Amino acid sequence: MLQNSSSNGRARDRLRLAIPSDGVMYEGTLDFLSGSGMRVRRPNPRGYTGEMRTLRGVEVVFQRNSDITARVEEADADLGLVGFDNFAEARIDDGDALVVIEALGYGHCELVTAVPDSWVDVESMADLADLSIEFQESGRELRIATKYPVLTRRFLHQHDVNYFTLKRLSGAVEPAPAIGYADFIVDLTASGQTLRENHLKRVADGTVLESEGALIANRRTLRENPERLETAREIIERIEASQSASTYSRLTANIEGESEQAVAAKVLELPEASGISGPTISTVYSRDGRQVYSITVSIPKRDLTAAVDHLRSIGGASVSVSDAVYLFREESGIYARLLGALGLS
């Protein structure tokens, strides 16, 4: 287990960020952090620590995805990047771990209920509820294989499936019905290919949870340590600014006009071309003496074609488009919500 203190007894000063050590979430998390300007270097492929040179106040530790929620809950780490499914399964009610960002945009999957293809009469959770009664009346209970007993039990009870036995597995779950270990399964799927290969079908209304990468935090360690809280703010703001920028493009064009105000009025004729708070306009010192102004505007990518067409229609020349790397708002809404959850707002 990670230790909260150094060997000489002093409390650690740097924020500790736990990220997955292997598997699909490992690569996805590294790519996500790199895309947010926080590239992690792992000097030893089998090591448990990494470096984040763009943020000096961060200590990166690699942990199994299934262990990260517990590490954050127990204050061995201040922040963690983990699949939301894992957090939902492992979190402690009224514990110190909380979700800061539930959906980071990578690691998409669903926790689903899947039954054998041969169960032609089972299409819904209501069918499973009826089947559980039939099994109970015949002297046995439905057997369900899963890695998520907490979420599975809660979901089944919500759908009146009350007679069952959970078989918790640590390895592959999909083969369980075929080898006679379980009657059906509740497991993660991304594309559904593995389910089909094991002759399983999804129950129509049997989705327990939709999941992707999430950022979680320990409320106590952040509340009690201003330096770590400030580092957490930097991480949150970079993530938020990177996600905001991914949906925007920056347009630049030269437009001839009588004045900056006149050019601005033309641009603002189309709301989709107005950007976040209007165009930025500066003088172009033309060699031939014409009054030309350079306009720059950041717009949602969905409005790109309409904005380019509008700039052309008002005389825009050399319209260039670039992707924003970061888009920092006036304040971070995510960080403000975190402060509220910590009782510091």
Image (cartoon, rainbow, N blue to C red):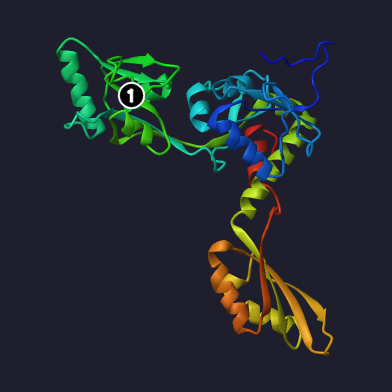
Which quadrant of the view contains residue 63?
Answer: top right
Above or below, 36 against 62 in this view is below
What residue appears at the point 68 percent right and 26 percent down from the top-left corner? Answer: 78
User: Residue 8 at what x, y percent from top left?
Assistant: 85, 11
Left or right: 288 with respect to 222?
right
Image-based side of 44 in relation to 97, left or right: right
Could you tell me which residue is drawn at 36 percent across and 24 percent down?
174
Amino acid beneath label 1: Ile
Foreground of the two, 212 or 32:
32
Q: What element carries label 1?
A: strand
Quarter of the N terminus within the rendering: top right
Quickly name the residue at label 1. 185
Q: Position of residue 316 (x, y in %)?
A: 66, 80
- Residue 152 lies in quadrant: top left
Rendered position, 76 above or below 326:
above
The reply, left or right, for residue 169 in relation to residue 306 is left
Q: Position of residue 5 (x, y in %)?
A: 77, 15
Q: Quadrant of the C terminus?
A: top right
Residue 267 location (% of width, % of height):
64, 78
Classify 79 as above or below 4. Answer: below
Residue at 58% x, 78% y: name it.
310
State whether residue 337 appears in this view. Answer: no
Camera-nearest residue between 90 and 172: 172
* Number of numbered tags placed on the structure image: 1
Q: Is residue 57 above or below residue 306?
A: above
Which residue appears at 68% of the width and 42% of the height? 34
Q: Residues within 10 Å of mark 1 (few under 14, many from 20)?
A: many
Residue 14 visible: yes
